[in-house]
């Protein structure tokens, strides 16, 4: 956990020493991990690569001058239009591409039937280094990607068969740590507000269950049909009509938390005096709410940055696919407090 505010950025040229200090290892270890010359334990190598991407370290690459295609699902593009998670992932991806001397071209992937043609077109273009699939986890598209004649990596998703490399937030641990933070404040009846459908979001439900243990009442899971504040507000308002049997809400997205705020206020429920609210996302807007929203902050830009390094690995023979999950940080603000008399 850290106090509110951003992690201090390293100014000027990033050096191996900066990465070593971030991870807590020697510069020699960092050098071996980044150059793939010499053994570094896989988990440690993943942490070093993630730190290098987060700091935007300009690692040598054979991809300079090439283009990467970013194929985004329809929900991901809708999220982008709403200035939510996808926007910040794309910013990190573009910054990393600029450092590596690459270009990023967006490609729409409205449905799974388009995937085969898009991947074939990418393979036929010598200027395309590979394809990144953003927020895509349907089985048909993943099957096409596994068989693609072009390097593919997944962004904000993962491959259950582990044939494709991927990067995503560690959703299960993020939800577990967020739930545990609320339980340490005395909350036992913690409502989970979620929009189900994707495997990555399912893991947030699993993390909530992990931390709730025997208190994981299925009746405390409230599902909405979209990542919209209006949908969340309606769902919480309906839940409150049955009586308030919870003292905290863990929202699986900041937009859902905004809806929870509206519903609670409409019912005259004080935040955090009567109900604490904590969200998983960490969008910049969260700090501007009243009260400022406590969040489990996802390193969204780092998710985009690491994706390009995974694509580089996917082009290298002999390197097995790997799943990178980035840790999230707990930021406690004014929307969470000790449980009140209930």
Image (cartoon, helix red, strand yellow):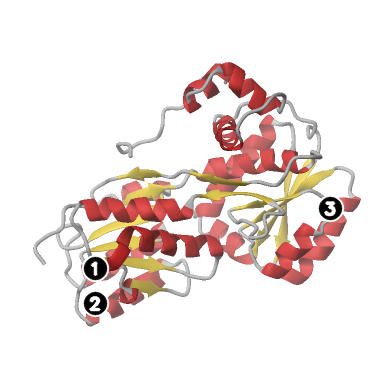
Q: Is residue 187 left or right of residue 164?
A: left
Q: Quick one: 173 or 299, which is closer to the camera?
A: 173
- Residue for point 79% across, 48% down: 151
Q: Is residue 75 left or right of residue 162?
A: left
- Residue for point 41% across, 32% down: 7
Q: Is residue 145 above or below residue 297?
A: below
Mark number, residue 240: 2
SS class, disc 1: helix
- The residue that disc 3 covers is 122
Label 2 – label 3 distance at C-alpha: 51 Å
Residue 186 visible from this viewpoint: yes
Around disc 1, counting alpha carbons within 10 Å, would you say few (fewer than 14), some (14 to 19), or many (20 or more)?
Answer: some
Mark number, residue 296: none
- Residue for point 59% across, 37% down: 46
Residue 102 at x, y = what percent? 74, 36
Residue found farthest to the left:
341
Q: Is residue 147 above or below residue 131?
A: below
- Residue for point 29% across, 63% down: 249
First in sequence: mark 2 or mark 3? 3
Considering the image in quadrants, where does the N terminus appear? top left
Q: Quadrant of residue 266?
A: bottom left
SS class, disc 2: helix
- The residue that disc 1 covers is 264
Residue 203 at x, y = what percent? 48, 61
């Amino acid at each position: 956990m850290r106090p509110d505010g951003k992690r201090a950025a390293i100014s000027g040229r990033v050096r191996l020493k900066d990465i070593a200090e971030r991870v807590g290892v020697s510069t020699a270890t960092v050098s071996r991990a980044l150059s793939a010359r010499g053994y570094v334990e896989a988990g440690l190598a993943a942490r070093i690569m993630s730190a290098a991407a987060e700091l935007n370290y300009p690692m040598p690459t054979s991809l300079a001058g090439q283009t990467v295609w970013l194929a985004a699902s329809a929900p991901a593009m809708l999220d982008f239009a709403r200035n939510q998670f996808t926007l910040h992932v794309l910013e990190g991806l573009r910054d990393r591409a600029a450092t590596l001397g690459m270009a990023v071209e967006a490609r729409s992937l409205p449905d799974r039937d388009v995937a085969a043609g898009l991947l074939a077109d990418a393979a036929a273009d010598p200027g395309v280094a590979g394809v990144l699939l953003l927020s895509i986890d349907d089985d048909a598209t993943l099957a096409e990607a596994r068989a693609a004649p072009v390097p593919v990596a997944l962004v904000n998703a993962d491959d259950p068969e582990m044939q494709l490399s991927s990067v995503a937030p560690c959703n299960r641990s993020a939800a577990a740590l967020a739930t545990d933070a609320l339980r340490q404040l005395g909350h036992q009846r913690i409502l989970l507000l979620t929009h189900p459908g994707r495997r990555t979001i399912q893991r947030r439900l699993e993390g909530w269950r992990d931390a709730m243990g025997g208190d994981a009442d299925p009746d405390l899971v409230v599902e909405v049909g979209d990542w919209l504040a209006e949908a969340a507000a309606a769902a919480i308002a309906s839940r409150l009509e049955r009586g308030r049997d919870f003292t905290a809400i863990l929202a699986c997205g900041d937009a859902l938390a905004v809806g929870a705020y509206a519903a609670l206020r409409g019912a005259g429920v004080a935040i955090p005096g009567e109900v604490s609210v904590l969200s998983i996302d960490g969008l910049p807007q969260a700090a501007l709410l009243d009260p400022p929203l406590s969040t489990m902050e996802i390193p969204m830009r780092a998710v985009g940055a690491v994706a390009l390094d995974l694509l580089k690995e996917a082009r290298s023979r002999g390197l097995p696919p790997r799943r990178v999950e980035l840790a999230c940080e707990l930021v406690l603000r004014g929307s969470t407090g000790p449980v009140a008399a209930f």
